[in-house]
Image (spheres, rainbow, N blue to C red):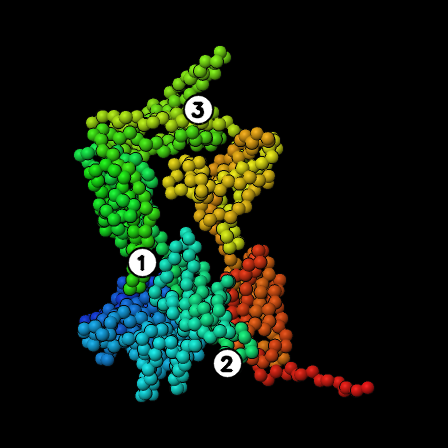
Amino acid sequence: MTRMLQRLAAALALSGGCFYATVYWYHSGNTSSIDRGDRQPIARLESSVNEVQRKPLTRMIWERVSLNDDLYGGEAIRTNAHSEARIFFARTGTLIELEPESMIVLEEGEDGIALNFLSGHLLVRSQGDATAEGSSDRPSVTLRSAGQDISLQQAEVSLSADQQGTINLEVLSGQAQVLSGGQSQTLQRDQRALLATDQEVQVERVQLKTLSPQAGTPVLINPDQREPVLFRWEPLPPGYQVILLAGARRSELTPVVGASAAGEAGQLTAPARVGRYFWQLEARRTDEARAEELPSPLFSSTQPLEVIAKLPPIPLEPLPDAELTLRPENPRVRMSWTPRGQMSQLILEVASDPQLQNKLHSLTLDSHQTSAEVELPQEGTYYWRLTGFIPVGDKTESASSPLRQFRLSLSPELAAPQLRSPEEDQILSEAEVQRSGVLFSWNPVREAASYRIRLQKLEIEPSSDGTPPTTEVNTLLDQVVSSPSHRSGPLTPGLYRWAVVATDQEGKHSKPSDFHSFRVEGLKEIQWAQAEPVIDSLYWSEQPQLIVQWQQDPSLTHLQWRVRIAPQTSQQDNLSRDIQSTEASQVIELKTSETYIQTPVPRDGRYRVIVEALSDPAQQVVARSSVKTVQVRPQPFLPAPRFAASLPEELRSDARGNIDLSWNPVPGATSYQLEIIDAEGNKVLERSPQGQSTQLRQLRPGEYQVRLLSMDQHQRLSREAATRRLQVPRQSDIQAPRLKRIEVQ
């Protein structure tokens, strides 16, 4: 028993020692436990996407870097496959953008700040003015990689490191100096250099020079209008066709469908979505007769591109063409809006003319502000708009809302409320009213403390002697509410009218609003094929398409369905209000004999749809559906297939030029497209296998690129492709065919 206790004590002591040793090792590697003494930070993390990590070179554990954290010399910074980082050096005015799977080491010495670039991709932008006063006192910034030093103080450069450690340096603007072997070499704009350890610097000029978009400068588009992005380059001689390559990563650039133009045109446009991408231009020769004169293919530098939504603020109140009544002692109008996008500030303009030349107010507001009050002491018609300012690099872009107008009257009495929904002569479905009641709403009245809503049902009795019919009025609701809206309970079919009176803090009443009449019809309800309140309409064509389906009712004897479609409004008082109050130019009305509809719509977004059954031949409405919300958006493209894990990163065929390829299946793919591209950029082979493997036979010796794409049921190829390099050895045993002996008769 004593021996057993001794063994347990020894095991406990050993386990405790290992535990405390592990804790000590962890805390000793923690960057927060480092005593930096009087050392000053040399940079800070300005922004990041996903997790960015750092560690001192003397430690083992990587830790996360938070926004605006200080960075010190002797620290390594890295990004993973899905993260990016922007590091700002305040003392030099230099901005470093680390792309995914990149790593640098920050160093500080007597000569200034140095960056040891180890792997990945890096964009360096100098934000300081080299000619400004005091700029000569700034410390220099030097990049060290592959045994060379690169001066970065007055240049904007892009650097990429491959798996062999070779650095591809491209000068996007300014100039950079490369110090190698005691010699200095200056690179100008649109020059690139290959840097490798113990090798001479190889300099070449970029043959396809891009003009815009510029690296590091975001591009603004209005996604509501499907604005394209303009790509420009220095025009080429006739005989070239330029295509655009784009992708989420540098290594996954694929041609953009429809984005091509003649080389001499100098520009092309391509559709774009908000996000971050990489792009490159490729020029291919179209006139093979001029092969010696026109080298092909030509490539531009690969550059990052950030697409930002350019969306103006949305005005909310006053509503368009609103009639406002204020008291003379407090003629202040409240204006509200919804800001959108990454705006730095807003400007609210109020004028007495539609050209905004006679401005009464021009207020500069914070970008997060959503309302303001302006004083308008005189009656009249006023016009207002909002302008948002979006920072784009060193510039600022503006986006203005549509111009709105309202009419202002001054009266010592409370203004009569303006009714909104239900509107005059609006028709409501009994099924919808029984399900959710009726939502009554009106514009709020300034200084009103409460409202009294009155709802009446009108029973019209026709006379038999030719005299006018009699109308019996039954009051169903007479209630005081505190907010400018009220939902009633279910109503039976019939004709109704309603009005509202406002009351202030002192108990004084406004004049009653005008009565609005509406009708509840006891129509049979058409059932939708999908019960969800919001359904998706996914389209695969260039033009947005709305597709919706409903159920056939055997009891209905009609020949046609009438479908009304309207864009969803910003303020939803009642679902059917979108259809019945939207301007006629925005309402799409169709008739069909089928129980579904597929029609083009102006843009992506939400739409409201109502279906009505029409009798024959009177074309009377005998049934109506509830209002269905349909979200129109493009059907997502399939992702690119992934090559099988058993295949190496760089493929190599056998001596006869044969190789077997396989990949993982992509859900939803009906087939795949395999392309073989030679070193000249020419497509030498294309096939469409149905399964997840294929065999390539008797390829000629050389270096190729294998591109694999997935295809969906609508014959759409994936936007991105899986790519691998393929080497076919020169020592191929493919022999030319031998001719048999030819006998001439």
Crowd tier of the residue under label 2, counting other residues whose Cα lies within 10 Å: few below 14, some 14–19, many 20 or above? few
Q: Is residue 471 visible?
A: yes
Among the 4 quarters of the image, the one containing residue 511: top left
Query: What residue is pinned by disc 2?
Result: 293
- In the rendered image, the quadrant that contains the C terminus is bottom right
- Between label 3 and label 2, give the one nearer the viewer: 2
| In this picture, residue 50 sits left or right of residue 270 | left
Sequence order check, earlier mark of 1 and 2: 2
Q: The residue under label 2 is which amino acid type?
A: Glu
Percent across and percent down for residue 654 are: 60, 78
| In this picture, residue 625 sits left or right of residue 135 | right
Which residue is pictured at 29% across the width and 71% down the height? 126
Looking at the image, is 262 positioned above or below residue 666? below
Secondary-structure class at tag 3: strand
C-alpha gap between disc 3 and disc 1: 53 Å
Secondary-structure class at tag 1: strand
Among the 4 quarters of the image, the one containing residue 467: top left
C-alpha gap between disc 1 and disc 2: 43 Å
Which residue is pictured at 40% across the width and 59% down the height? 275
Q: The residue under label 1 is which amino acid type?
A: Glu
Mark drawn on residue 397: 1
| In this picture, residue 638 sits left or right of residue 117 | right
Percent across and percent down for residue 13 are: 34, 66
| In this picture, residue 523 sits left or right of residue 484 | right
Query: What residue is pinned by disc 3?
Result: 495
